[in-house]
Amino acid sequence: MPFVSITRLRVRSWVYLPGFILYSFKSARQAKNLPDNLSIALLRDRRNTYWTITVWTSDAAMKSFMLSGPHGEAMRKLPIWCDEASVAHWTQDSAEPPTWLEAHARLRSEGRKSKVNRPSAAHTTIQFPEPRVGSSNQVRFK
């Protein structure tokens, strides 16, 4: 069964945006080139907030990606760069990625916080608005 991973990250200062954006695209390229990655999409939301939806052949495939290459490097920087970070995972019958609104609902109901050094109030409660979705603020790589 396909394994879905959703992330929502809010970069706490514009100072960290160039590095964050660079690693986001390096990580997306890394995932796109892996045979076990079925889909990857990125969404730029309000207030320096970024979402990802990835679909994998298995939990093990996602974990292998998560800790390696540019993505592994970016994860080590995340506690410094972000003041909000959360993730949700699930399996589903279809390899088709969920919508951004479904990703939001699952993240709110089933998500968990990632470690950040300076958490915001929204991070502490995992309370945040639905993402703003439009054709100009999202990219699907695969």
Image: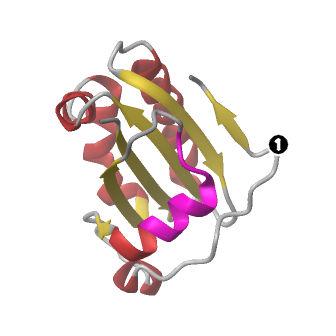
Residue 102: % across, % down: 56, 61
Q: Provide the residue designation for mark 1.
A: 136
**Closer to the camera, 41 or 30?**
41
In what quadrant of the picture does the N terminus appear? top left
Q: Is residue 99 magenta?
A: yes
Q: Residue at x 53, y 36 (%)?
A: 96
Q: Which residues are magenta?
A: 97-106
Q: Residue at x 62, y 62 (%)?
A: 101
What secondary structure prevails in the magenta region? helix
Residue 77: % across, % down: 32, 47
Q: Is residue 61 magenta?
A: no
Left or right: residue 111 versus residue 61 is: right
Q: Residue at x 49, y 39 (%)?
A: 19
Q: Residue at x 82, y 43 (%)?
A: 135
Q: Is residue 108 above or below residue 8?
A: below
* Colour mode of the rendering: secondary structure
Q: Secondary structure at mark 1?
A: loop
